[in-house]
């Protein structure tokens, strides 16, 4: 093999592009070990739903969120915000103030989830009376 042949072979091997990858198996939330279950658990958390919907409107500081979400404890809000930050749904920005304050803002990924959760919140508002009636009927029937 000549020096030219070696250079051509090396150049060709560096420029090879692999074909399309076979499609990955989609996650199966019905499988016990599927990581989407953790995400579904987080999405189903009332504090996460309420927090994300407020941050969607505009960036908020911790204490503003705590005042607006009645019943949430400081510890629970802190845990919720950390989980949401870890999942890439929000960003946490430390502001150069005295005392130091932190502002939370929604990310593009968080926006996609917030759009889905809007429908869930509307459904809950529109159907709470129906659900409460069904519960009363169930509880009064002796089935419970």
Image (spheres, rainbow, N blue to C red):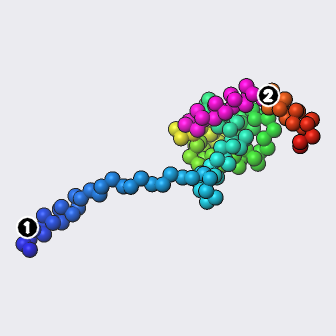
Q: Does 125 appear in magenta?
A: yes
- Find residue 62 and report its horizontal and vertical position in percent: 70, 40
Q: Nearer the viewer, residue 70 or 17?
A: 17
Q: Does 118 appear in magenta?
A: yes
| Quadrant placement of the N terminus | bottom left
Category of crowding for the residue at label 1, using alpha-carbon neighbours closer than 10 angstroms: few (below 14), some (14–19), many (at least 20): few
Element at label 1: helix
Residue annotated with mark 1: 4
Residue 86 shown left or right of residue 63 in the figure: left
Q: CA distance from mark 2 to mark 1?
A: 80 Å
Q: Residue at x 59, y 49 (%)?
A: 87
Residue annotated with mark 2: 130
Q: Nearer the viewer, residue 79 or 121?
A: 121
Part of the protein shown in magenta:
111-128
Q: Nearer the viewer, residue 93 or 81?
A: 81
Which is more foreground, mark 2 or mark 1? Answer: 2
- Find residue 11 and report its horizontal and vertical position in percent: 17, 62
């Amino acid at each position: 093999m000549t020096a030219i042949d070696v250079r051509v072979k090396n150049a060709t091997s560096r420029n090879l592009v692999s074909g399309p990858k076979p499609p990955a198996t989609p996650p199966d939330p019905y499988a016990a070990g599927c990581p989407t279950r953790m995400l579904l658990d987080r999405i189903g958390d009332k504090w996460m739903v309420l927090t994300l919907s407020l941050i969607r409107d505009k960036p908020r500081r911790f204490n503003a969120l705590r005042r607006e979400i009645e019943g949430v404890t400081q510890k629970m809000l802190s845990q919720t915000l950390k989980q949401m930050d870890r999942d890439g749904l929000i960003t946490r920005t430390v502001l150069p103030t005295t005392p130091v304050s932190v502002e939370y803002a929604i990310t593009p990924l968080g926006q996609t989830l917030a759009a889905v959760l809007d429908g869930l919140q509307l459904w809950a508002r529109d159907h709470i009376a129906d659900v409460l009636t069904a519960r009363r009927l169930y509880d009064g029937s002796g089935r419970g």
